[in-house]
Image: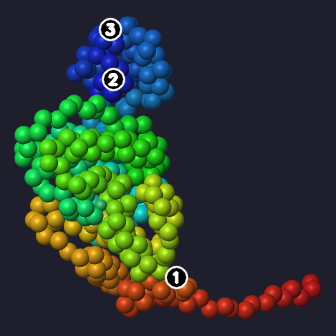
Amino acid sequence: MGILREKFDTQTRQRSRIRDSAKVCQFIINGEWILPHNRLEEMSELWRAVQTIRPSQNHEPDKLVWMPHPRGKYTIKTAYTVLRTQHPKTPWTRLFWTGACIPRQATIAWMAVQDTLMTQDRLVQWNSLKISNCVLCNNQISDRVTSLNSSATTYSPVPIIQRPSSQVSSLSSLCNQLLYDHYKQASNTSIYHWAQQHASSSTRPIPENGFHIFFECQLAGSIWKQALAWCGVTRKHTNSVKEWRWILRRLAGHSLHKLLIQTTLTATIYWIWGERNARIFKQQARTEQQLVQLIIRDVKIKLGSSKANYIDNDWNRLAAIQVGQAMNIVSTQQVWVSWEPPPQG
Ligand SMILES: [Zn+2]
């Protein structure tokens, strides 16, 4: 009677006086259901349903049935499905998890768009770092100033601003105006700490957070602009929230040109994040042009080997040229047909 464990809590089961180890056959005598005397109101529906089933006459032993599987078989796949938390698919999922994107790049992009990358603003909030400063567009501030243990300066406490938790699930974090405003406020902590330095640099820090690095940062924004231009798209960059709303609304799709931009987007995020890490942890820096070339190289390698067919239109042709051949652009030819009425009778 394992079903009782699924349907009712421990107290209810105890009140029913049916043991957890009870078997279905204990409730069948001479092929008829014998229901317990102590039938709880909570279980009345269950007993009613049981009586609509005719007990088997074959006297077969009880067997386990794995309900999540249509044939009652236990499989790892169905167990995983039962255990995992499932959320409705967000409309922007398909932007990153298409076969066209390079998986490791899609993973970083996925984290970026949900604002889960370990940006410096977050570390300042956790008090692991004193000052958040973007190394891509502002390398004038030395490590000595920003690192935790470098200075004997004691900082006045600043109120901790909680990251807003309410989000619209259909929009990614980088489309969230509340979160954007929060970062603008949280950035003040870095500026405040910087101002308290005894010998603070004359260069003010430019706080690093998800919105800044994708793509309000001067360097990152310029790389994204050039990458988009390579895809044949030119647009005026406004602020990060508007940019991401445009990206998530307009770049979904399965045409070759859409796939080109999606792959370019994930490659751009990957290389910008990689460059940020290289500058912080390895003290190595690439130029803007080198980064753009790396993005284009990855997109060409990934899409250039595709064998899929795509409809012949201006955008797809442009995309095919950019990734250099191999694309099967299928031209749609007009076929004229006419209809004649059938002969009378
Ligand atoms: Zn920057």
Which image quarter is the N terminus in? top left
Separation of marks 3 and 1 at Cα, in angstroms? 69 Å
The image quarter in which residue 274 lies:
bottom left
> Which badge, 2 or 3, is on the more N-terminal residue?
2
Q: Position of residue 158 (x, y in %)?
A: 26, 32
> Which badge, 3 or 1, is on the more N-terminal residue?
3
Q: Which residue is mark 3?
A: 15
Q: Against 173, is 217 above or below?
A: below
Give the numbered dot on residue 4.
Answer: 2
Q: Secondary structure at mark 3?
A: helix
Q: Which residue is mark 1?
A: 315
Name which residue type carries label 1. Trp
Q: Nearer the viewer, residue 63 or 79?
A: 79
Measuring 41% from the left and 21% from the top, which residue is drawn there? 32
Which image quarter is the C terminus in? bottom right
Q: Position of residue 78 (x, y in %)?
A: 30, 47
**Crowd around label 1: few <14 · some 14–19 · many ≥20 (10 Å):** some
Mark 3 or 1, which is nearer the eye? Answer: 1
Q: Nearer the viewer, residue 8 or 122?
A: 122
Name which residue type carries label 3. Arg
Q: Are marks 2 and 3 in contact (CB under 8 Å)?
A: no
- Is the residue at mark 2 in contact range of ligand 1, meaning its CB lies under 8 Å from it? no
Measuring 28% from the left and 75% from the top, which residue is drawn there? 288
- Is the residue at mark 3 in contact range of ligand 1, meaning its CB lies under 8 Å from it? no
